[in-house]
Image (spheres, grey):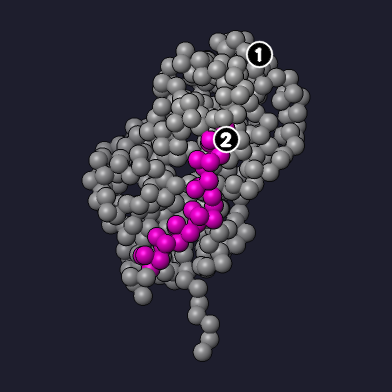
C-alpha cells in the first residue's frame, strides 16, 4: 500500500507585501508545511513581496491586470484550485474572503476564513459600507469556520454582523520568540541615528488607522531629547514628512520605509509606540514584548487584551496627547520599573510562540477537513 497523500490547503491573500497579515501567513506556511501540501494564491502581483519557501505560489493576476476588472477570472482560478484541495483558507478581510466563500461553494469544498481586524471599524473607510456590511453578513456566515486574532474581533463579528459565535474561534497571532530573543547588532544604516539618543520606534503602515500624525505631534512636545523612527510605507508618508518639517523636528525623525531587521530595531529602541484608532492584534506589539522592548499604546480593546498598564506595558487614553507624553516620560525616568514591565511582557507573550499557534491552527483545520472525509 502506498503512502497516503498529505491533505492539501489553499491559502488566499491579496498581496505578499511586508505587512502584518503577510508575515503571519509566512509563519503558518513554514510551520504547517510538513503536515500539509500548501498552495498560496496571491491576487495582486506587486514589486515588493516575500515568497514562502515551502509552498507552491500562484499569482492570480499579472502586474498589468486590475483587480476590479478581473473578478470572474479570479473566481474561476480560485474555484479550480479549491476543487483540487481539501480546504481553502481566506487570509484577507472583505474581498478575498468573499471570493473564497464563493469559490468554495462552487467547488463544493469547505472554507476557513481568517479575520484580521474589527471589520465594523474597517468599513468606516469604505465608499460603500452598506453593501460590504451585507456581504460580510452573507458570506462569512457560509464559512465552515472563522478564526479571529482577538476577542474584540470576535465580538465585532457577532454584534455587528450577526455571525454565530459558535462558528468563530479566537486564534492569536504567532511570534517567532527565538528570533526576537536573540541578540542583534544595531540596525544597519541607522547606527548614527540610534546612537544619538533614545529612539521611540513606530512600526506601522502609514495609513490613517495608525494615527501617526498624533504621534508626530506629541513627539514634538516631549521634553526628553529622543528620536522618532517610523518604520513602514503608505499613503500618509508625504503628509507626515511635511508635518515634521512644520513642527521643526525633521532632524529628529526618520522614515526608513520597510525594514527586514525588525528584531534589531526593537532591541535597540527605547520603546515601541503605537496610537492606532483600532487594531486586530498588532504584530509589532507582540514582537516588542518578545524582544524585551517596552510597549506604550492606547487603551483600545485589542491592545488591552495584551497589555495591562503598569504590569507589562504602559497604556494611555486614546487620542490623549498629554497622557501619552506622561507614559513616555515615565518610561524614560524610571529604568527599574521599565525593566519589570519588560520582564512581565516576556512572560505574557510566551503563549504566542509560532509553534503553539500553528498547532492551534492545525486543530481548527482538522476539525473542518475531518468532517468531509
User: Magenta span has 315?
Assistant: no
Left or right: 146 in relation to 199: left
Tag shown at residue 267: none
Percent coordinates x, y for residue 301 in the rendering = 37, 33
Read off the magenta span: 342-369
Residue in the picture at 64% in, 46% down:
179
Which comes before the other along the chain, label 2 or label 1? 1
Residue found at the far bottom of this picture: 1
Label 1 neighbour load within 10 Å: few <14, some 14-19, many 20+: few
Is residue 46 in view?
Answer: no
Residue in the picture at 23% in, 46% down:
162
Percent coordinates x, y for residue 88 in the rendering = 41, 62
Nearer the observer, 234 or 359: 359
Tag shown at residue 225: 1
The reply to whether discs 2 and 1 touch (Cβ–Cβ < 8 Å) is no
Q: Secondary structure at mark 1?
A: loop
Residue in the picture at 53% in, 36% down:
345
Residue in the picture at 53% in, 41% down:
347
Is residue 240 in view?
Answer: yes
Q: Is residue 326 above or below residue 142?
A: above
Q: Is residue 107 above or below residue 342?
A: below
Q: Which residue is mark 2?
A: 343
Left or right: 192 in relation to 363: right
Q: Is residue 132 above or below residue 114?
A: above
Counting every numbered tag in the picture gives 2
Nearer the observer, 79 or 250: 250
Amino acid at each position: 500500500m502506498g503512502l497516503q497523500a498529505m491533505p492539501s490547503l489553499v491559502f488566499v491573500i491579496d498581496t505578499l507585501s511586508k505587512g502584518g497579515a503577510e508575515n503571519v501567513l509566512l509563519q503558518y506556511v513554514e510551520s504547517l508545511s510538513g503536515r500539509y501540501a500548501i498552495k498560496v494564491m496571491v491576487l495582486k502581483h506587486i514589486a515588493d513581496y516575500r515568497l514562502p519557501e515551502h509552498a507552491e505560489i500562484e499569482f492570480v493576476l499579472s502586474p498589468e491586470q486590475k483587480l476590479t476588472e478581473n473578478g470572474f477570472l479570479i473566481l474561476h482560478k480560485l474555484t479550480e484550485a479549491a476543487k483540487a484541495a481539501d480546504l481553502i483558507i481566506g487570509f484577507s478581510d472583505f474581498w478575498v474572503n468573499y471570493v473564497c466563500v464563493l469559490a468554495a461553494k462552487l467547488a463544493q469544498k469547505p472554507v476557513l476564513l481568517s479575520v484580521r481586524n474589527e471589520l465594523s471599524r474597517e468599513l468606516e473607510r469604505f465608499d460603500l459600507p452598506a453593501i460590504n456590511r451585507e456581504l460580510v453578513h452573507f458570506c462569512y456566515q457560509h464559512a465552515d469556520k472563522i478564526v479571529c486574532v482577538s476577542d474584540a474581533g470576535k465580538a465585532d463579528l457577532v454584534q455587528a454582523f450577526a455571525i454565530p459565535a459558535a462558528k468563530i474561534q479566537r486564534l492569536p497571532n504567532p511570534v517567532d520568540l527565538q528570533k526576537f530573543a536573540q541578540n542583534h547588532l544595531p540596525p544597519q544604516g541607522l547606527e548614527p541615528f540610534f546612537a544619538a539618543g533614545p529612539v521611540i520606534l513606530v512600526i506601522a503602515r502609514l495609513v490613517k488607522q495608525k494615527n501617526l500624525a498624533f504621534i508626530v505631534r506629541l513627539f514634538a512636545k516631549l521634553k526628553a531629547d529622543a528620536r522618532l523612527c517610523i518604520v513602514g510605507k503608505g499613503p500618509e508618508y508625504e503628509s507626515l514628512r511635511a508635518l515634521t518639517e512644520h513642527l521643526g523636528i525633521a532632524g529628529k525623525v526618520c522614515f526608513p520605509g520597510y525594514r527586514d531587521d525588525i528584531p534589531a530595531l526593537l532591541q535597540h529602541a527605547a520603546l515601541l509606540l503605537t496610537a492606532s484608532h483600532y487594531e486586530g492584534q498588532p504584530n509589532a506589539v507582540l514582537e516588542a514584548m518578545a524582544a524585551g522592548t517596552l510597549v506604550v499604546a492606547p487603551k483600545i480593546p485589542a491592545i488591552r487584551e495584551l497589555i495591562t498598564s503598569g504590569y507589562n506595558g504602559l497604556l494611555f487614553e486614546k487620542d490623549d496627547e498629554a497622557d501619552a507624553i506622561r507614559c513616555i516620560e515615565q518610561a524614560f525616568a524610571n529604568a527599574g520599573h521599565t525593566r519589570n514591565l519588560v520582564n512581565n511582557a516576556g512572560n505574557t507573550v510566551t503563549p504566542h510562540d509560532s509553534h503553539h499557534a500553528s498547532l492551534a491552527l492545525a486543530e481548527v483545520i482538522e476539525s473542518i477537513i475531518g468532517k468531509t472525509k
